[in-house]
Image (tube, coloured by chain):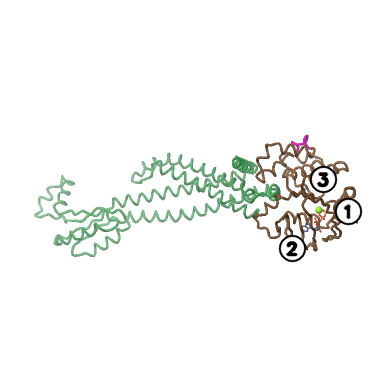
Chain colours: A green, B brown
Amino acid sequence: MARLHVARYLLGSALTGLWRNRTMTGGAIVTTAIMLITLAGFLAINDTLNQMVTALGRKSNLIAYVRDEARPTQVTAIIDDLRTRPGVGEVQFVSKEDALAIFESRFVDQRDILDVLQSNPLPASVELRLNDPSVVPDLAQELQTMTTVFDDVVVPLDVVEEVIGISNLARVAGSVIIIALTGVTLFVIVNTIRIAVFARRQEIEIMKLVGATDWFVRGPFVAEGAIIGGIGAGIAAIALVVLYAQAAPVVTRIVSFLPVSTDTDFVRNLAVFTLLVGLIVGSLGSYFSVRRYLSV
Amino acid sequence: MIVLEDVHKVYPNGTQALNGVSLEIPERDFAFLVGPSGAGKTTIIRLINRDETVTTGSVFVEATDVTRLRRRDVPQLRRRVGVIYQDYKLLPSLTVRQNVEFVLKATNEFDHLSDGLVEETLATVGLTRRTNHYPHQLSGGEQQRTAIARALVRRCPILVADEPTGNLDQESGWETIQLLVQLNARGTTVVIATHNRTLVDTMRRRVIEIERGRVVRDEPEGGYYG
Ligand SMILES: Nc1ncnc2c1ncn2[C@@H]1O[C@H](COP(=O)(O)OP(=O)(O)OP(=O)(O)O)[C@@H](O)[C@H]1O
Ligand SMILES: [Mg+2]
């Protein structure tokens, strides 16, 4: 019962304060929403890039062509060793005969080319499927040094490296922008609450003189900050869900290889995360501004 | 029980307000604090409520050493000392009733918002017909009575009134004092800082006279002038 009274009092004072100061409140809410939308946007982009790296890695093959004179036991030993390596998925041996069969099936029309040849010109090969594309460069180099076994090592390196590069860049740029935006948001919330504190300085004085506890004086302001953060986050979350519902299918259609997360779980988690960040930033911002400017 | 021991108070701007004040006001006492303007009466009241801190010396309220009070224990002290301020400190945006309710909310006494205490208190100071007025719609005396109601509603064991009759005519001033006398009879320690000579002379109660930051007279049944 008493708790209910306190809660109602806190909420009531907070809402009165926000309304009394509505221009600043609106600005703070919009700033918070923009910060959170950006934050969520970067998280979504980051997630997409991560999935892309994984997907490309899954597709990426490393092919080592085996010399005709290489000893089969040696090749088998290498294959067994490769299977134990981290980041390596499947390892497959493609014999000269297999290679020929594949060639024939793929180029049915040009069979006669092969007919004129006396022997099978296609080399045997070891094909690796990688789970982690970042191991590709080292692995390729290692295989390349085994000149007695392998003739040549082919790596579809460029794309993977580029995506990893972009993804790292996005992460760094995203972090910088998010830190800056969080700073701006905190600044706006702190100032909004400062004004609210100033508008209520008489009330605060009386509260303190009659023996209100620090948290009771601070409470309504922290609630104001939490409400600003919460509403800002709510707007951001709604914008996020709507934008995602609109954008994801379009993006997927245009660049079909992009594995954009379309599952609702991802968007829901993002929305919940956004809300939490909003509430935390709002409450913390006002807590510190009251602390600083009230000295209660 | 309020005890001041050799209290000196120098305000940050260098004004020496108190210059070695020692006094003792036992529980259930009724005392006037008199002296010329600027003598240090309000300063003494502020020290008791820990609204200001001493420069040197000590202040005790009940068993509490006010000068060594931890910050988080200050509210407990202030809840036991009700102060009626010289400048009322009413909130202009709240009605008479809301001003009284405000202090109950501030000290987390929500239960008393709906048990008739507020109405009873407003009736005691004769403001029943002014409950929905804002401070600027009240006469000086009505504002003063609102300030008194706001102190009464808190039911503190110690009540300190800074010039409570300043804005009242002879008759209303007299009524206010009668109110404080009744409270005192029911156990409240009452301290009144005042310039009201007639009042002090008529009452013949304890008088502590302050002059230039010192106690110059302390009589159990005195008049305004010694
Ligand atoms: N906050 C303050 N800062 C600096 N000086 C102050 C402050 N408050 C009071 N003073 C000074 O301290 C001295 C005592 O002031 P105080 O208010 O205690 O007097 P008082 O006895 O209550 O006077 P009055 O009868 O006019 O109310 C005065 O000289 C006053 O100017
Ligand atoms: Mg005074």
Q: Earlier in the sequence, mark 3 or mark 2?
A: 2
For disc 2, the marked residue is B55
The single residue placed furthest to the left in the displayed view is A118
For disc 3, the marked residue is B181
Q: Secondary structure at mark 1?
A: loop
2 vs 1, front mark = 1
**Residue A40 percent across, percent down from the top left:** 46, 47
Query: Amino acid type of disc 3?
Result: Val
What is the quadrant of residue A147 in the picture? bottom left
Q: Is the CB of the residue bearing disc 2 within 8 angstroms of ligand 1? A: no
Cα–Cα gap, marks 3 and 2: 33 Å
Q: Residue at x 69, y 43 (%)?
A: B102
Image disc number at residue B222:
1
The single residue placed furthest to the top in the displayed view is B129
What crowding class fits label 1: few (fewer than 14 Cα within 10 Å), some (14-19), or many (20 or more)? many
Q: Ligand 1: which quarter?
A: bottom right
3 vs 2, front mark = 3
Q: Secondary structure at mark 2?
A: loop
Q: Residue at x 35, y 49 (%)?
A: A52
On whether disc 2 and disc 1 are found on a single subunit, the reply is: yes
Q: Is residue A231 left or right of residue B173?
A: left
Q: Earlier in the sequence, mark 3 or mark 1?
A: 3
On whether disc 3 and disc 2 are found on a single subunit, the reply is: yes
